[in-house]
Image (tube, grey):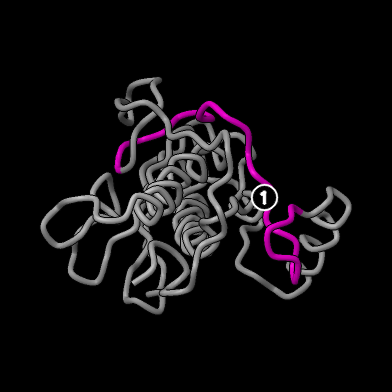
Amino acid sequence: MSPEQGGRPLPDAVPGTVSAPRGGSFGKPAARAAGRLTPGLADGRLTPARAAGRPGRLAAPAALAALAAVLAGCGGPSVDTDKPLADGTYAATSGEDEDGAIGRVTIEVSGGAVVACEFDVILEDGTPKDENYGKDSSGEVANDAYYAKAQAAVAAFDRYAAELIAVGYPQEVDVISGATWAHEQFVEGAVKAMRQAQEAWAEDPE
């Protein structure tokens, strides 16, 4: 199984991709490692998606904008930005990918905005994609390149969670090269969680 995209080869890892430092929780203003809350953007720049049909090349900003517009027009999952969010903690999961893995998103809403977010991907056997993802069955790194690509995908989990806090809505979170399947799962889970917050507000407006 490939480290990302359900058995298909990953694009090359992008230089400058970093994971957030360990630490953080719903009540603490620190970035998190995979599986812990991320209240802000991790260090490093966001990486644009690869241009469609042009493997190995990054899309120009104009092309990325056009692609985003097309995807938005295709009716992908999104949150109604006109509906307020009730304060509280909400969690949701995505559907399974081709390998049976699911995305799990937990958000904390305070003051009507997402202030903390956690994103994990859980494999079919129940284990998370973490620092061991990409190792062989004995827990060793048998292939350095394979492991590096797997860990680049894991690092993107923190950055998706961080960008949601920065931009406010899942549909505005950009795809990171090498973690496109995780992006789909993150957006789906985050949309479900934020809709829960909107439904809670509709039932008991503040």
Please give the range of residues in magenta.
35-58
Residue positioned 68% across, 58% down in the render:
56
In the rendered view, does 145 fall on the left or right side of 163?
left
Main SS, magenta residues: loop
Q: Within the image, what quadrant is residue 99 found in?
A: bottom left
Q: Within the image, what quadrant is residue 196 found in?
A: bottom left
Q: Specify whether residue 50 is painted magenta.
A: yes
- Residue occupying the far top of the picture: 29
In depth, the one of 172 and 4 nearer the eye is 4
Residue carrying label 1:
172
What's the amino acid at mark 1? Glu
Q: Is residue 187 above or below residue 37?
A: below
* Residue 83 image offset from top left, x and y in percent: 63, 52
Check the picture and name the quadrant holding the N terminus: bottom left
Q: Is residue 44 above or below residue 98?
A: above
* Residue 103 image offset from top left, x and y in percent: 38, 61
* Residue 101 image offset from top left, x and y in percent: 33, 69
Q: Is residue 10 above or below residue 44?
A: below
Alpha-carbon neighbours of circle 1 within 10 Å: few (<14), some, or many (≥20)?
some
Q: Specify whether residue 99 is painted magenta.
A: no
Q: Within the image, what quadrant is residue 97 found in?
A: bottom left
* Residue 31 image offset from top left, x and y in percent: 41, 26
Residue positioned 53% across, 48% down in the render:
13
In the rendered view, does 179 fall on the left or right side of 171?
left
- Residue occupying the far left of the picture: 138
In depth, the one of 98 and 95 nearer the eye is 98
Q: Find numbered disc 1 in the image and state the secondary structure of the residue it sits on.
A: helix
- Residue occupying the far bottom of the picture: 98
Residue positioned 52% across, 53% down in the render:
198
In depth, the one of 202 and 48 nearer the eye is 48
Residue positioned 27% across, 65% down in the render:
123
